[in-house]
Image (spheres, rainbow, N blue to C red):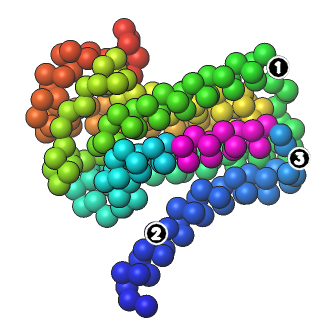
Amino acid sequence: MNKEKIRLILKYARGILFFFGLPALVFIVAGTFRWWQAWVYIGISYAASITSRALITRIHPDLVQERVNYSEKNDAKKWDKFLMPIVALISPAAYFITSGFDKRFGWSSPVSVWLYSSALIFTLIFYAFSTWALVTNRFFSAVVRIQTDRGHTVVDTGPYRYIRHPGYLAGIMVALFFPFMMGSWWSFIPVGIMVVGVIVRTALEDKMLKKELPGYLEYTQKTRYRLLPGIW
């Protein structure tokens, strides 16, 4: 087996391990599989992930390769090589595991039915919003870089008409509803770290795009806000 095949096997094994291993770890940490809130949340997350990936495979097949091969992009910004793992890998793992320990030891008081129901509805809405951003933007890479190899241009349609980084907004909102969905107030701590990381990443990426992506500065004059209309 040559090195290229080994590299591909390791790459896909890493993705599969995170996709299936993290939810399994949550139940192991919790010490039980009888946790319906976790089953609901994981089911929604899987459905949203599979649906969005199926759509971009059909609409933007080149984007699939871009996202799969993100670790090989040598032109990714140096600061994002630090931030991306924190917001996309480490923080999600931390709040899943925290919620598992919370379930095991009963640290948090129960979440009311109305609060859980509201969180469920908004989680579905923002997963749909994230999918909308993903299928609209064929340059929706997993890392921050100018994709000159893919003809990178400004995207100003779909949700990008209203805010410049709708994918980040969706990620923040889904994370903020996670503690309500899982019944874990303590998971707000790692969720908060993730949110701060995304806000910092948004600011740095926006600054980079203004300097390096033709037409982006003009786009910011039309679509004024990064994440929250009327605020920032």
Q: Position of residue 189 (x, y in %)?
A: 63, 35
Q: Residue at the location (22% across, 56% down)?
A: 75
* Residue 71 to residue 90: above or below: below
Q: CA distance from mark 2 to mark 3?
A: 32 Å
Q: Residues within 10 Å of mark 1 (few under 14, many from 20)?
A: few
Percent position (x, y) of residue 111?
A: 81, 24
The answer to whether mark 2 and mark 3 are in CB contact below 8 A is no
Residue occupying the far front of the picture: 58
Q: Where, by quadrant of the figure, is residue 13 drawn?
A: bottom right
Q: Which residue is mark 1?
A: 112
Please, what is the three-letter code of the amino acid marked with disc 2?
A: Lys
Residue type, numbered disc 1: Ser
Q: Earlier in the sequence, mark 3 or mark 1?
A: 3
Give the SS element for disc 1: loop
Say the numbered circle drawn on residue 11. 2
- Judged from the image, the secondary structure of the residue bearing numbered disc 3 is loop
Q: Main secondary structure of the magenta part?
A: helix
Q: Quadrant of the N terminus?
A: bottom left
